[in-house]
Image (cartoon, rainbow, N blue to C red):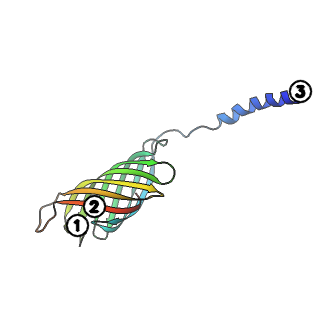
Amino acid sequence: MIRVSFALLASLVVPLCAAAQQDAPAGTSVAPAFGIHYGNPLRLSGAIGFLVDRNRLRDDGLIVLLEGGQHGGELAMGYFRSLGRFGSGYSIRAVALRTTGEPWNASPHTTYAGVEAHAMLFFGLGGRMGYYRRASAATPDAKDNVETVGISIGY
C-alpha cells in the first residue's frame, strides 16, 4: 500500500516540476562586445561595440564595433555567430578603415573600405583576415589594396 501511494504521489509531483523548467523566450537582446587585436595595419588596437542577438537560442545577429589602434582606427558592422559555450564563433564584417602615422602594409592618412573575417577558436582567442581597397584620394606611393592578418582576443 505504501508503494502504491508513493508511486501515485510521484506521478502527481513530477509533472509540476517539469512544467517549471521552460526555456527563456526567444527574443532580441543587446550585449556588449570588446576585443584586443594585434596585426596590420593598426598594430595593437582595442575594439568596443555591441552585439544585437536576434534570437537568444541561436546566438547570432548584428555586430557593430569601433576600433582604435596605434596607427589608425576602424568602424565595422556585420554578422556574428557564437558556437558552443567555450567562446568560439565567427563574424563577417564590412569595414571602414582610416590609417594614421606609420601603419604596417598600408599608406598613412588614407581611408580604406573592405571586408573582414574573424574567427574565435576557444575562449575568445583567434584571428582575423581582411581585404581593403583605397577609398580616399591617391597620394604618392599610395597602396590601393591592403590585405590584413592578425591575432585577437574577443571580438
Q: Secondary structure at mark 2?
A: strand
Q: Position of residue 92 (x, y in %)?
A: 33, 50
Q: Secondary structure at mark 1?
A: loop
How many tags in the picture?
A: 3
Residue found at x 32% / y 66%: 39
- Give the mark nearer the N terminus: 3 vs 1: 3
Q: Position of residue 36 (x, y in %)?
A: 40, 64
Above or below, 57 against 105 in this view is above
Task: List the residue tagged with mark 3.
Answer: 1
Q: Where on the picture, by quarter, is residue 111?
A: bottom left
Above or below, 146 against 84 in this view is below
Kindly check if marks 2 and 1 are in contact, taking CB atoms under 8 A apart as contact: yes
Q: Residue furthest right?
A: 1
- Give the mark nearer the N terminus: 2 vs 1: 1
Q: Position of residue 26 (x, y in %)?
A: 49, 39
Residue found at x 24% / y 59%: 147
Labelled disc at residue 105: 1
Check disc 2: other Cα within 10 Å, few if <14, some if 14-19, many if 20+: some
Residue found at x 85% / y 30%: 3
**Left or right of 102: which side holds 38?**
right
**Left or right of 111: which side holds 65?**
right
